[in-house]
Amino acid sequence: MTCSAEYTLQLRARGFRMTSQRLAILHVLRHEGTHLSPGEIYKKALMELPGLTEPTVYRTLEFLAENGLARSSHAGGGRLTYQIAAADHHHIVCRVCKTEIEVEHRLLSSLYHALETASGFKNIGSHVTFFGVCPKCQTN
Amino acid sequence: MTCSAEYTLQLRARGFRMTSQRLAILHVLRHEGTHLSPGEIYKKALMELPGLTEPTVYRTLEFLAENGLARSSHAGGGRLTYQIAAADHHHIVCRVCKTEIEVEHRLLSSLYHALETASGFKNIGSHVTFFGVCPKCQTN
DNA sequence: TGCCTTATTGTAAGTTTTTGCAATAACAAT
DNA sequence: ATTGTTATTGCAAAAACTTACAATAAGGCA
């Protein structure tokens, strides 16, 4: 089950619809992992989905937060930033057939810890997508 | 000691200046007692000080919050509202000589409690100014 | 009191966020 | 597949908020 399909089901269960705009924005949030301002999200999502507009981004972010797919938090002042809600897992995508499987975050936690110690960085991006070749494609 | 004089001293002690704009905005905050949006504050303060501009209101509110004279809080969404910081006392102003004395809030708490019980309202405005004639002017 | 320094304001323009409504497209049902 | 319902989007304009900089005025000092 891909991430997008899960999101779609979650929305449909509540009587809402999945759209290309929502997918693009979710994809940006997932890929970045960290807090982003609506403006930043708009710029990045626009590259994935030309024609996307700002009002849609604002409405979508509020919508995603209300429905548990994103979380909002207060940046300095009164401004909101957004991040993906379930940011505690990762993916491996098959280079050949594009199959996507999940990787639990705990498998990576020691890596993150080491990276943070070594670099001095904090809150290193928590959603990562790896690429590889899946078992099936390895035999073909 | 009037409220305004106290505020002036607090600012001066930190190397800042008291201005008519800051006084007008503080007066609005004190008089309303509850949370107000920058826009609401602007409209009310404009009546007291014609010519006041919006950028000044925004800057002043941020300034007052930084210096402990006002408090900011997050309204729904990401928007900031402001209220007076020390909202736990009241005043009586002499109708004749304009002398101003403080009234501790606890003297009024039972009144507030009764009002809230009777009306069903909550957070009834916590700063009130009464008017009267001071002892000195009574003898004259 | 009048001058001097500089914190603070107003101006004008820019950016961000919101809103109402007609056009679009997701998806359920035929 | 096709159609109907209606959630969702884009558009256009407004409202909210921010910024840079020149003009103003508060408060210290002579």
Image (tube, coloured by chain):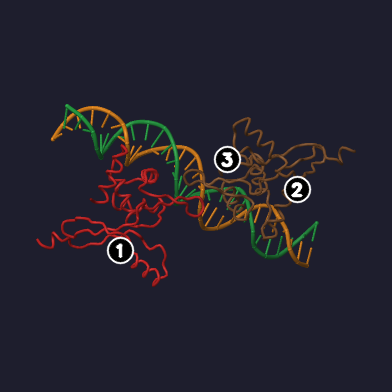
Chain colours: A brown, B red, C orange, D green
User: Toward which corner of the image does residue A126 lie, by quadrant?
Assistant: top right
Residue occupying the point 55% across, 48% down: A73
Residue most extreme to the left: B140
Local crowd size for mark 2, using a 10 Å CA cut-off: few (<14), some (14–19), many (≥20) = few
- C22 above or below B63? below
Residue type at mark 3?
Glu
Disc number at residue A40?
3
User: Toward which corner of the image does residue A12 lie, by quadrant?
Assistant: bottom right
Do the numbered discs 1 and 3 sit on residues whose CB atoms are within 8 Å?
no
Q: Nearer the viewer, residue B39 or B132?
A: B132
Local crowd size for mark 3, using a 10 Å CA cut-off: few (<14), some (14–19), many (≥20) = few
Residue type at mark 1?
Leu
Tag 1 residue: B107
**Residue A21 on image: x %, y %:** 65, 48
- D29 above or below A71? above
Local crowd size for mark 1, using a 10 Å CA cut-off: few (<14), some (14–19), many (≥20) = few
Q: Is residue A23 left or right of residue C15?
A: right
**Residue D22 on image: x %, y %:** 33, 31
Tag 2 residue: A2
**Residue B43 on image: x %, y %:** 36, 53
Q: CA distance from mark 2 to mark 3?
A: 25 Å
Residue occupying the point 17% across, 60% down: B134
Q: Nearer the viewer, residue A137 or B133?
A: B133
For mark 1, name the chain.
B
Q: CA distance from mark 2 to mark 1?
A: 64 Å
Q: Nearer the viewer, residue D13 or A136?
A: A136
Residue occupying the point 42% across, 53% down: B37
Which of pointers 1 and 3 indicates the residue nearer the eye? 1
- The quarter of the image holding the C terminus of chain A is top right
